Amino acid sequence: MRRALLGEVKGTCITCAKFKDITHEYSTIDGIQESVHDILINSKEIVLKSESSETQKAFISIVGPERVTARNIELPTCVEAIDPMQHIATITKKINLNIELEIEKDRGYRRQNIMEYQDGNFPTDAVFMPIRNVNYSIHCFESHDKRIMKEMLLSEIWSNGSITPEEAIYEASRSSINLFLPFLHAEKGKQDSEGEDIHESNAPHFVYPSVSIAVDQMAKKVTFKHIFIEQLELPPKAYNFLKKINVHTISDLLDYSQDDSMKMKNFEKKSVEQILEALQKRFGICLR
């Protein structure tokens, strides 16, 4: 769980900055106290929260003299700056500072590719990990009747403010569940294969189709409760609408019929088609 919290929880950060007429990371700009390198370092430290998994564009366009902070970034509606007072640069003269920023949502750590430095584009090392540190300890205690020893797990979680500890535990648990789901399918495939071998050898065997189908349906139902709609990789419009109507898992989505979806206000036919196509492509579910 500690590893999942540190490495599997998604975060948002600035991954690239574009300056006009700047060719080198260590260049200086007349009228700006910081070098381009310092501005890049400050930019990647900005704590952001995004509701979209798509790459977003943001802009800084300001006239000095001025102290530039996160509040001066023109962000898309789906992105929020957690601390508006985080420092970016200091303009000391009456000049224009224009920077185009790329914002991405991902997990883990990604090193910059120096080869991509061109036309004023400067990629930055991206730290997508919103959880900064996790400590845990296990405490033993007796039950009320003093017959059973119990254990309590105490976790201490530090985040950058873009996610609460409760949300982080939820997402880390979801990632861990998704990690082990393929083993369930692999075991089922193994059992099916063994069943075929027995059948081919003409050994006595007993088949209960109704029980087998019921177990398979139950397994799928449990599985779909733990697979979240993010795995469908839907366009932002369809994804945001499903979130708005509290559809978080594939199981939630399957509770809605196609007719129900078409009747929902502001839910376009195109979005319904995109969802049906994603279900068919990712999980082989055909609802047409």
Image: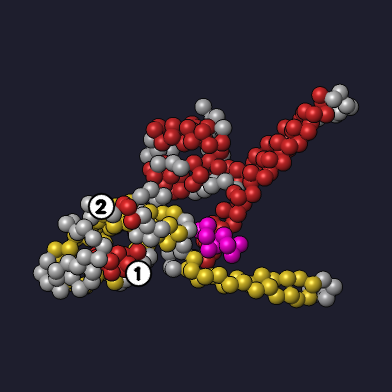
Earlier in the chain: of badge 2 and badge 1, it is: 1
* Residue 125 x/y as whole percent: 38, 60
- Give the spatial CA distance, label 2 vs label 1: 30 Å
**Mark 2: which secondary structure?**
loop
Question: Which quarter of the picture shows residue 273?
Answer: top left
* Residue 105 x/y as whole percent: 41, 54
Query: Which one is in front, 257 or 166?
Result: 166
Tag 1: residue type?
Answer: Asp
Question: Which quarter of the picture shows residue 4?
Answer: bottom right
Q: Quadrant of the N terminus?
A: bottom right
> Where is mark 1, residue-wise?
83
Residue 165 seen by the camera = yes
Marker disc for residue 60: none
Residue 77 seen by the camera = no
Which residue is at a point 22% across and 52% down the rendered structure image? 119
Q: Residues within 10 Å of mark 2 (few under 14, many from 20)?
A: few
* Residue 31 x/y as whole percent: 14, 70
Tag 2: residue type?
Answer: Gln
Q: Horizontally, is 231 left or right of 199 in the view?
A: left
> Where is mark 2, residue-wise?
118
Magenta stretch? 1-14
Which residue is at a point 59% across and 65% down the rendered structure image? 2
6 falls in the magenta region: yes
**Mark 1: which secondary structure?**
loop
- Say which of marks 2 and 1 sits in front: 2
